[in-house]
Image (tube, helix red, strand yellow):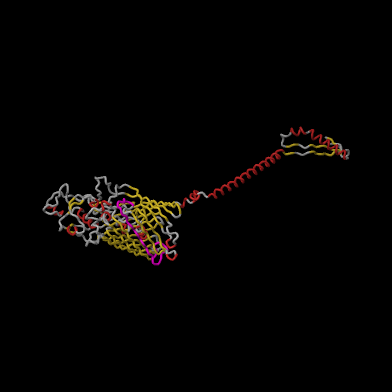
């Protein structure tokens, strides 16, 4: 039997091989057929046909070529995907290694760019208003760059932008700060080269009202602040930590401090600022708190500096410098700025901003050549709901004619004669001008005389003598504060100023009182509105001063603005008390 099965196997193989070409010929078909033989179980013989006693025997099986092809494709795809995955993983590892190497290098620009948002800060400040005057007169300006017509222009009203800043701060390191604050402002007046412009404003029938000129009426750009500040001056001294030193065009140590204490700078100027002390000087300054016994409470706050005799909008002309110093004491300590009871002293000393060759010229009116001095002593108390401050002011030669009439004033104060000129040397002109009947003053077309009762010329000559004689002593008393109405966004505020521009004069026609009272609404942390009444009143009754008495404090006879002024010693220059000013303001502040 074993031999028979071998024969059967051999025959099967022969049949398989003999059909191989046929199988290859079938490669194009999806299904390949199996081969079937029949075996005689008794003899073991193999037949290709069925018969009696023969059993079917199948060699091979049907094959699905498409399935095989799909399997091959799947295996190939799997290998390709594995290769791609491996390549991606290798690249990721390489990227991580490169990133670690770059981070380890820590280049300077990496930290700079990463902290870019901490290097700069941009802000803005906007003051706008609508104002209405029921009574107009001569006075200092209520706010920067505001002017109003003089007497006889009741019901004057206007919309104004008095201030617009862009504050740019740059912090190259944590210890240094640079601030640049350009100011856009509206200029008023005439350029000095325009001889046809008289700088007069209002009262066109006499051309007698005017204001201080700062050029040509266009919008202009100037630098308000530009300084470099080192913020860690006393970082190793615990009690002085927080001190700084600054160089450039600086906020001086008093005016900005007082503005913050008051809190309503967008409504009106503070006392010394109202009379000409600028908030910005060019120089060097140190400031900071003093904290005793290693605590966090501030017991002293100081600011001291040396500056030009000019300011941010005036050229330096002198060969001298001025100094300022402010010290604020908090007897019980302050956890926040201005908290509780405070006592503040301010001192300012300097010389007129005059060139050295002019400083030594002998003159009766020495104000621009003389030294000046300002002192302020304040007692103040602040709580979150309210604050109140009282201030005493003392000065020497600290107020000029331009300061007193920076808002509006007689054109004579700024170089333009007012009123109709008198050119006929007759009895009427002598009476009006005070000229002696002998005609020692010759009123002519080339050198006319002032009409005393139809101009402000002789009166302005007296004002100039009062304010610019070099022996001027200033005395003032002020109160200001505010009250935040609980559970509302409203606050009440006010300021009162009583000031004598020169108390060495027995009765000074320029002595005045100023008071501001209003209500403010805070819309949000950036935007505030206010409605307020602002008033300047010269409180003496109308009076005149004899020429002889006026000569005692610097009045000079002769010519003023090209016209003769009264010279008879017994002649009384009349109507010396200026008109009052009463106005209503609607103010807006945007500070970001």
The relative height of residue 22 versus residue 236 in the rendered view (above or below) is above
Residue 16 position by quadrant? top right
Residue 399 or 373: which is nearer the viewer? 373
Q: Is residue 541 above or below residue 86?
A: below
Q: Position of residue 7 (x, y in %)?
A: 86, 37
In the image, 387 versus 416, the foreground residue is 416
Q: Quadrant of the C terminus?
A: bottom left
Residue 318 lies in the magenta-colored region: yes
Judging depth in this view, the residue of 326 and 115 nearest the camera is 326
Instruction: Please give the name of the residue rendered at 42% of the width and 55% of the height, measured from the top-left corner.
Output: 230
Does residue 134 appear in this view? no
Stretch in magenta: 312-340
Residue 231 x %, y %? 42, 56
Instruction: Indicate whether residue 79 is drawn in magenta.
Output: no
Please state the horizontal and vertical placement of residue 66, each as a whole percent of the image. 70, 38
Q: Is residue 490 left or right of residue 446?
A: right
Looking at the rendered image, the quarter that the N terminus falls into is top right
């Amino acid at each position: 039997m074993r031999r028979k099965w071998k024969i059967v196997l051999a025959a099967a193989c022969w049949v398989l091989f003999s059909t191989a070409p046929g199988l290859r010929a079938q490669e194009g078909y999806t299904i390949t057929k199996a081969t079937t033989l029949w075996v005689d179980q008794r003899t073991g013989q193999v037949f290709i046909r069925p018969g009696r006693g023969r059993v079917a025997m199948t060699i091979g099986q049907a094959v699905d070529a498409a399935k095989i092809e799909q399997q091959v494709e799947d295996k190939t795809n799997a290998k390709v995907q594995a290769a791609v995955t491996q390549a991606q993983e290798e690249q990721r590892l390489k990227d991580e290694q490169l990133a670690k190497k770059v981070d380890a290098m820590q280049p300077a620009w990496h930290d700079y760019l990463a902290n870019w948002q901490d290097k700069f800060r941009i802000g803005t400040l906007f003051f706008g208003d609508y104002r209405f005057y029921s009574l107009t007169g001569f006075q200092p300006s209520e706010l920067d760059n505001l002017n109003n017509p003089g007497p006889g222009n009741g019901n004057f009203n206007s919309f104004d932008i008095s201030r617009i800043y862009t504050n740019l701060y740059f912090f190259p390191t944590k210890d240094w700060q640079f601030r640049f604050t350009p100011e856009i402002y509206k200029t008023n007046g005439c350029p000095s080269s325009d001889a046809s412009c008289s700088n007069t404003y209002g009262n066109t029938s006499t051309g007698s009202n005017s204001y201080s000129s700062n050029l040509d009426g266009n919008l202009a750009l100037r630098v308000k602040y530009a300084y470099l500040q080192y913020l860690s001056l006393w970082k190793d001294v615990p009690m002085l930590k927080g001190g700084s030193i600054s160089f450039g065009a600086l906020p001086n140590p008093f005016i900005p401090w007082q503005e913050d204490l008051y809190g309503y700078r967008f409504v009106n100027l503070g006392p010394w600022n109202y009379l000409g002390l600028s908030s910005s000087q060019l120089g060097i300054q140190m400031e900071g708190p003093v904290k005793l016994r290693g605590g966090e409470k501030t017991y002293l706050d100081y600011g001291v500096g040396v500056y030009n005799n000019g300011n941010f909008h005036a050229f330096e002309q002198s060969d001298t410098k001025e100094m300022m110093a402010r010290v604020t004491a908090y007897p019980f300590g302050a956890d926040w700025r201005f908290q509780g009871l405070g006592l503040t002293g301010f001192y300012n000393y300097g010389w007129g901003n005059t060139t050295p060759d002019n400083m030594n010229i002998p003159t009766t009116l020495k104000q621009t050549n003389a030294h000046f001095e300002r002192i302020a002593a304040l007692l103040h108390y602040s709580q979150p709901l309210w604050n109140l401050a009282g201030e005493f002011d003392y000065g020497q030669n600290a107020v000029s004619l331009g300061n007193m009439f920076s808002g509006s004033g007689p054109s004579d104060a700024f170089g333009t004669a007012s009123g109709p000129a008198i050119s006929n040397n007759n009895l009427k002109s002598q009476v009006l001008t005070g000229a002696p009947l002998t005609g020692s003053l010759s009123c002519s077309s080339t050198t006319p005389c002032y009409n005393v009762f139809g101009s402000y010329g002789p009166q302005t000559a007296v004002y100039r003598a009062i304010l610019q004689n070099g022996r001027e002593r200033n005395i003032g008393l002020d109160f200001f504060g505010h009250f935040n109405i609980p559970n509302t966004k409203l606050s009440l505020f006010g300021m009162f100023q009583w000031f004598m521009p020169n108390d060495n004069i027995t009765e000074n026609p320029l002595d005045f009182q100023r008071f501001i009272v209003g209500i403010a609404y805070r819309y949000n942390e950036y935007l505030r509105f206010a409605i307020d009444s602002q008033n300047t009143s010269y409180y003496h009754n109308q009076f005149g001063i004899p020429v002889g008495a006026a000569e005692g404090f610097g009045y000079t006879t002769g010519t003023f603005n090209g016209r003769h002024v009264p010279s008879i010693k017994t002649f009384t220059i009349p109507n010396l008390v200026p008109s009052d000013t009463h106005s209503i303001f609607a103010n807006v502040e945007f500070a970001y």
